[in-house]
Amino acid sequence: MLQSQWRLEDERSTELKKEQRLINKERNLELIRHNELERQIREAEDLKERNRDKEVLAEALARETALLNLESEEKENLRREA
């Protein structure tokens, strides 16, 4: 009788361990999915920031080019007048 009880307890213990492994596996998979989503969000934000930086730089360069062109035109006009 004790042997059958021990066997049942061993079977229950084995079953509980299997269930716990499945639960842990599901948690790990969920963490992996969550981490991947977080990574994708960070990458998208980084890309937006890089694009924003490029736009700001392009605008600054365009302004600088326009100023240089104006200065050149003014110098050319002064030379013509002189």
Image: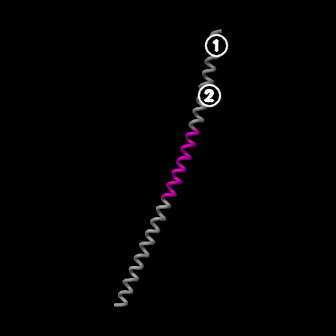
User: Which element carries disc 2, helix, strand or loop?
Assistant: helix
At 41% across and 79% down in the image, what residue appears?
70
Q: Secondary structure at mark 1?
A: helix
From the image, tell me which residue sits under label 2.
Answer: 19
Q: Earlier in the sequence, mark 1 or mark 2?
A: 1
The residue furthest top is 1
**Highlighted range, magenta:** 29-49
Q: Quadrant of residue 35?
A: top right
Give yes or no for residue 40 being in the magenta stretch: yes
Q: Residue at x 46, y 68 (%)?
A: 59
Q: Relative to 65, is 5 on the left or the right? A: right
Q: Are marks 1 and 2 in contact (CB under 8 Å)?
A: no
Label 1, label 2: how many angstroms apart (C-alpha)? 21 Å
Q: Residue 82 colored magenta?
A: no
Q: Residue 5, which numbered label?
A: 1
Quadrant of the frame with the C terminus: bottom left
Residue type (three-letter) at the residue carrying disc 2: Glu
